[in-house]
Amino acid sequence: MGRRRGLLVLSVSLLSIWLCAACLAELEPARPQTGTLTVSEYIAELDGLGSTARQLARPEEVPKLLNDIPQVWRIQTAQQTFEVSSEWLRQGLNDWQKKPSQEIQDRIVARLQILRSEAASFQDSPTDVSQKRALLNGILAGREFQNIHGPTWLDRFKQRVLELLLRLLGRVFRSSAIPTISNVVVYGLMALALLAVAYWMYRTIRNSAGVEPIGHPLLPVSSKGWKIWMNEARRAAEGGNWHDAIHLGYWCGISFLEAQELWRPDTARTPREYLRLLPTGSEHRETLGTLTRTFELVWYGTQEADANAFSETLAQLEKLGCQSH
């Protein structure tokens, strides 16, 4: 009897907890859905927020402003729909509410202006590269490019043989079913495998090292004019060395910007460090960012270097001011 009473009490308790949770869930207000804005509407909203942020005077004004800001802005362009988080703005307003200061207020306004500039760039019509594409197609149709191709069946066969040899050696070394293999045979197979790998790495590095060093290690990039870098990039492209052409094109842009004294020359600087030297509001930052990504994906990554990638590099160089003609 006592056991049944205990089970009954436990059931009633669980049911009560479940009902309370259900009531709380119903009372919790649903998060408003974020509507989709056009680019013009998004810019207008950023302008309004910037004006309101400049006029903030009392911490009591912040809660109402936070209620009017969605969690994310969803913007529809002609090409795609993307979202921009407002978490940074909410955090900045909360910081200002706790400790009002002109520094925080200026930082919020400055970032809203940056977002507006980025949004305005989506309203610009895309650059017509049809003439450049036609020019590149004409270059590729020339006789000197007829023998350019990807890996041949012989290259793929060599790769398969190397992979098979490495797999076979791995099985042999892990197996305890062949106790009669002598140390000489084992070490001989290991030496052959290492020689094969070393030869393959040597050939790969040799084939990839088509570009001369960027210059004397003690001289800045701008010691060689950007027009010289541009001419070398075009000669590499005419020879079908897209990998080298993109590499030289990137340093053409760096030499051009360095010649304008946008930073102090430093021979040990990395591409990402060059990009960080430009202030957020610089007119060249977005263009150099695109140029740097293309260079890194081709030079350090796995993106294939081709005519399209070189055409994109030339387009970004012209945006910087490096007129190729």
Image: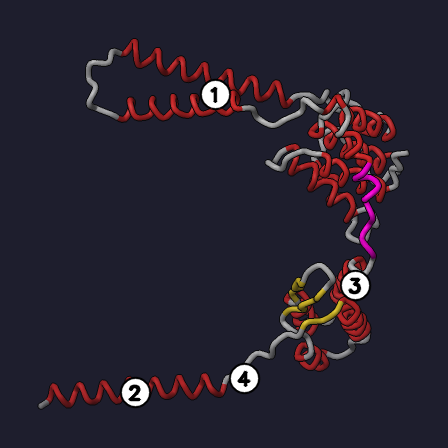
Q: Is residue 97 above or below residue 132?
A: below
Q: Which residue is at 64% across, 69% downward?
A: 72
Q: Which residue is at 11% across, 86% downward?
A: 3
Category of crowding for the residue at label 4, using alpha-carbon neighbours closer than 10 angstroms: few (below 14), some (14–19), many (at least 20): few
Which tag, 1 or 4, sits closer to the chain's start?
4
Q: Amino acid at mark 1?
A: Lys
Tell me how far mark 2 sits from mark 3, CA to CA. Answer: 53 Å
Q: Which residue is at 85% across, 30% downward?
A: 226
Q: Secondary structure at mark 4?
A: loop
Front position among marks 2 and 1:
1
Q: Nearer the viewer, residue 264 or 182?
A: 182
Q: Find the magenta span and give its range.
A: 125-134
Q: Is residue 272 above or below residue 9?
A: above
Category of crowding for the residue at label 3, using alpha-carbon neighbours closer than 10 angstroms: few (below 14), some (14–19), many (at least 20): some
Which tag, 2 or 1, sits closer to the chain's start?
2
Residue annotated with mark 4: 29
Q: Amino acid at mark 2?
A: Leu
Tell me how far mark 2 sits from mark 1, CA to CA. Answer: 70 Å
Q: Where, by quadrant of the figure, is residue 115 drawn?
A: bottom right
Q: Secondary structure at mark 1?
A: helix
Residue annotated with mark 3: 116
Category of crowding for the residue at label 2, using alpha-carbon neighbours closer than 10 angstroms: few (below 14), some (14–19), many (at least 20): few
Work out which quarter of the rendered image holds the C terminus and state it.
top right
Disc number at residue 158? 1
Q: Where, by quadrant of the figure, is residue 141 drawn?
A: top right
Work out which quarter of the rendered image holds the N terminus and state it.
bottom left
Which tag, 3 or 1, sits closer to the chain's start?
3
Tell me how far mark 3 sits from mark 4, CA to CA. Answer: 31 Å
Residue annotated with mark 2: 15
